[in-house]
Image: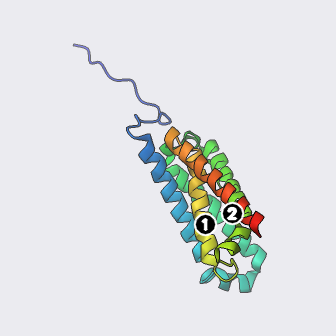
Amino acid sequence: MAEHLAPPRSALAAPHLVNANRLAVGQMVVVGVAAALFLRGTTSGPWVLLALFVGLHVVLLIGAVALLTMTYLLGTLTRHGSPLTESPGGRCGWTLLIWAGAAALVGYGRPALGQLGFEPDRHPEVGHWLLGVGVAVVVGLFSRSRQVRVGSAVLITLFVVVTAALRALS
């Protein structure tokens, strides 16, 4: 009697995705919150002390490398949330796209914070959480779920329109 063995699954093959929306939102939340908390920790504690000894430029370089590495690792842990995070090369591109997009959003919206009563120099935590939300929304643009991609695109468009209106009023 011959046994019929199932062919081995490739390690790179994505499992059957039961709920792509849940995976995408989970990836957005994990990466966005981790980014905001990481950035929140950079304005105090050991980073500031390290800057006194090695200089601000070195600390900024270390922080950028640590942030990109953390994002890459989070993409690895949540690799089925986006088609881009399923391969190591795709995760590198995904990491860079996320931070470039989030930085562009925050850079564009930062001047409008003053119109809303938040001066970035007096309330740096607002900028950290805004960047965390920006990262989460950009992660959504590259998600596996069409609904999450559309929702993220709508939120980004709304943010850009509201920011443009606030900038025009000043």
Q: Residue at x 26, y 14 (%)?
A: 2
Most extreme residue toward the front, as rendered?
169
**Residue highlighted by disc 2:** 106
Residues at circles 2 and 1 in contact by the CB criterion of under 8 Å: yes
**Which residue is more in the foreground, 81 or 125?**
125
The quarter of the image holding the C terminus is: bottom right
Determine whether the residue tagged by mark 1 lies in a helix, strand or loop.
helix
Q: Residue at x 64, y 59 (%)?
A: 68
Query: Residue 108 location, x and y as percent?
Result: 73, 61
Question: What's under tag 2, amino acid-wise?
Answer: Val
Most extreme residue toward the top, as rendered?
1
Q: Residue at x 57, y 49 (%)?
A: 152
Q: Earlier in the sequence, mark 2 or mark 1?
A: 2
Name the side, left or right, on which 15 lies relative to 87. Answer: left
Q: Residue 122 bears which disc, if any?
A: none
Question: What's under tag 1, amino acid-wise?
Answer: Leu
Mark 2 Cα shell of 10 Å, populated few (<14), some (14-19), many (≥20) = many
**Which residue is more in the foreground, 77 or 128?**
128
Residue 63 can be seen, yes or no: yes
Q: Residue at x 54, y 51 (%)?
A: 75
With respect to residue 130, does 30 lie above or below? Answer: above
Name the colouring of the figure.
rainbow
**Residue highlighted by disc 1:** 130
Determine whether the residue tagged by mark 2 lies in a helix, strand or loop.
helix
What is the C-alpha distance between the residues marked 2 and 1?
7 Å
Query: Residue 169 location, x and y as percent?
Result: 75, 67
Question: Dividing the picture into quarters, in which one does residue 135 lie?
Answer: bottom right
Question: Dividing the picture into quarters, in which one does residue 38 lie?
Answer: bottom right
Mark 1 Cα shell of 10 Å, populated few (<14), some (14-19), many (≥20) = many
Residue 42 can be seen, yes or no: no
